[in-house]
C-alpha cells in the first residue's frame, strides 16, 4: 500500500493512486464533474478534425473563439474586453493560472493569498520565485477574508492579490462590500488582482458572484481566469482563457507563445460550440449540484460535523478537528476502511489539517452510499 507523503499536491496524487486500486471506490474529493461533455460540443470537435484546421493557430487563440469569450464575459460577468487585445485562450484553467502568476510576479515579489486556496497557486508561485503572504480564515466566519487583514499584510514587495470566488476548497463567495473594499486596497497600493472565476456559474441560495473586473477600479488591474472544465464537464479538453487590460495581456500573450503556442485547435472549436450553443447543460448541472449539496450538508449535520456554508462551487469544506486526527491521516483511514476518497485540508495548506474537502460530483445514489460509508468510518474512529 502507498504511504502518503504528508502535504501538498503529492499527497493528493498518492491518495488518488490508492483509490484507483479498489474496484468500489467512491470519489468524494476530486474536482471532475461526473457528467459527460454535451454531445453538440463533441460533434463540433469531430467536424473540426475533418475540416482541415491542421495549421498552427495564433498563440492568443482563434479570433472567433476570442469574440465568443468576450461576449461570454460581458453577458455573465459584466466585463468589457476587446477580443483583439484583451483575451488569450489557454490550455485549461491551469495554464491560465501559471500565465497570470508569471505575468504579475517576478523573483522577490509578493502576493496576498487568502487561505485555504487552490493548491497549484502555491506551485506556480514557487516557479515564479515569488513570496506567498497567507491570510488565514476559518469555518466560523465561512472562510471570509477580512479586507483589513489584507491591508495589514501588504508590504513594499507586494505586487498582487489573489481572489478565487467561489473558492476552492472552501466554496466561499466574496460579497460585494468586501470586494469593493479589496479593490479599493488594490487601487491604493497599485496591486494586480488575479481573479479566478472558474466556478462562477455554480452559485447557491441568494449568494451572488461578482467579478472584480466588473466593478469600478477593477478592470484596469485585474487578470481574470476562467475555463470550460467545470461548467461544460470538459476537464480533459483543456480549454480556458484569461481576460484583462491590454498592457498585461500583451505579456500574457508573449508567455503563452513561448510556453505552448496556440491551444489545440480541436478544443478551440469545441469551446466555440460550448460558448455559442445551448446553455441548458450548465443549468442542468447547476440544478443537480444544488440538490446534491443539500444531501451532503444534511449528512454532515447528521454526523455532527461542522462546515463552512458552501456558497458556490462544488465543495464542502468540513471541520474534522473533533476526531483529534490530522486530515491526511483521517483521509487515509476513510479510504483504507471504507474506500471513500475525501481530500485532506492539509493538501491545500499545511495549516488546514483540521479540514477535509468533499465534492458532490457523484450521482445521488453513489453520493448517499459514500456518505453512509463515511458515517461508518467516522464511527469506527470516534467510537
Ligand atoms: C480554483 C481553480 N482554478 C483553476 C483550476 C484549473 O482549471 P482546469 O481544470 O481547467 O485546468 C481549478 C481546477 O480544479 C480550480 O479549482
Image: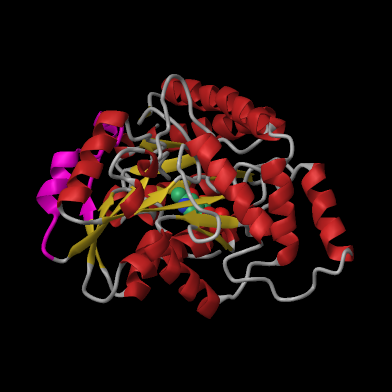
Q: Nearer the viewer, residue 154 or 297?
A: 154
Percent coordinates x, y for residue 271 in the rendering = 68, 52
Say left or right for 116 vs 36.
left
Q: What count of labels does the image hold?
A: 0
- Which quadrant of the view contains residue 282? top right
Colour mapping used in the image: secondary structure
Q: Quadrant of the N terminus?
A: bottom right
Q: Nearer the viewer, residue 238 or 169?
A: 238
Say left or right for 326 vs 94.
left
The residue most toward the bottom is 258
**Magenta region:** 134-156
Residue 340 visible somewhere in the drawing: no
- Identify the residue at image location x=66%, y=62%: 62
Please, is residue 364 above or below residue 338 in the view? above
281 in the magenta segment: no
- Identify the residue at image location x=55%, y=55%: 83
143 in the magenta segment: yes
Percent coordinates x, y for residue 362 in the rendering = 64, 37
Q: Quadrant of the C terminus?
A: top left
Q: Nearer the viewer, residue 152 or 253?
A: 253
Residue 284 visible somewhere in the drawing: yes
Say left or right for 47 vs 221.
right
Percent coordinates x, y for residue 378 in the rendering = 45, 35
- Identify the residue at image location x=77%, y=47%: 41
Percent coordinates x, y for residue 11 in the rendering = 45, 61
- Which quadrant of the view contains residue 18? bottom right
The residue most toward the right is 50
Amino acid at each position: 500500500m502507498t504511504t502518503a507523503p504528508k502535504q501538498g499536491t503529492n499527497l493528493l496524487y498518492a491518495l488518488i493512486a490508492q483509490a484507483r486500486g479498489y474496484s468500489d471506490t467512491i470519489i468524494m474529493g476530486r474536482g471532475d464533474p461526473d457528467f459527460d461533455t454535451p454531445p453538440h460540443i463533441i460533434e463540433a470537435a469531430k467536424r473540426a478534425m475533418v475540416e482541415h484546421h491542421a495549421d498552427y493557430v495564433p498563440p492568443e487563440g482563434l479570433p472567433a473563439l476570442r469574440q465568443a469569450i468576450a461576449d461570454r464575459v460581458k453577458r455573465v460577468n459584466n466585463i468589457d474586453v476587446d477580443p483583439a487585445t484583451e483575451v488569450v485562450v489557454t490550455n485549461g484553467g491551469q495554464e491560465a493560472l501559471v500565465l497570470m502568476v508569471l505575468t504579475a510576479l517576478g523573483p522577490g515579489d509578493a502576493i496576498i493569498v487568502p487561505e485555504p486556496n487552490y493548491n497549484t497557486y502555491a506551485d506556480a508561485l514557487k516557479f515564479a520565485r515569488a513570496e506567498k503572504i497567507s491570510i488565514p480564515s476559518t469555518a466560523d466566519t465561512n472562510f471570509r477574508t477580512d479586507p483589513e487583514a489584507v491591508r495589514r499584510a501588504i508590504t513594499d514587495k507586494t505586487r498582487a492579490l489573489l481572489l478565487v470566488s467561489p473558492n476552492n476548497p472552501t466554496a466561499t463567495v466574496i460579497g460585494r462590500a468586501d470586494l469593493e473594499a479589496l479593490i479599493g486596497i488594490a487601487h491604493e497600493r497599485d496591486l494586480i488582482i488575479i481573479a479566478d472565476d472558474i466556478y462562477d456559474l455554480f452559485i447557491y441560495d441568494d449568494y451572488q458572484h461578482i467579478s472584480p473586473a466588473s466593478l469600478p477600479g477593477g478592470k484596469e488591474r485585474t487578470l481574470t481566469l476562467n475555463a470550460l472544465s467545470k461548467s461544460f464537464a470538459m476537464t480533459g479538453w483543456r480549454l480556458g482563457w484569461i481576460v484583462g487590460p491590454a498592457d498585461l495581456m500583451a505579456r500574457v500573450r508573449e508567455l503563452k507563445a513561448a510556453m505552448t503556442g496556440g491551444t489545440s485547435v480541436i478544443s478551440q472549436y469545441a469551446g466555440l460550440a460550448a460558448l455559442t450553443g445551448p446553455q441548458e447543460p450548465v443549468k442542468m448541472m447547476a440544478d443537480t449540484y444544488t440538490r446534491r449539496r443539500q444531501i451532503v450538508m444534511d449528512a454532515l449535520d447528521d454526523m455532527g460535523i461542522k462546515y463552512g456554508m458552501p456558497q458556490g462551487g462544488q465543495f464542502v469544506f468540513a471541520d474534522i478537528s473533533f476526531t483529534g486526527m490530522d486530515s491526511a491521516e483521517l483521509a487515509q483511514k476513510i479510504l483504507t476502511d471504507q474506500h471513500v476518497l475525501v481530500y485532506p485540508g492539509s493538501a491545500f495548506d499545511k495549516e488546514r489539517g483540521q479540514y477535509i474537502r468533499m465534492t458532490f460530483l457523484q450521482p445521488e445514489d453513489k453520493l448517499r452510499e459514500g456518505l453512509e460509508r463515511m458515517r461508518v468510518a467516522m464511527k469506527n474512529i470516534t467510537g
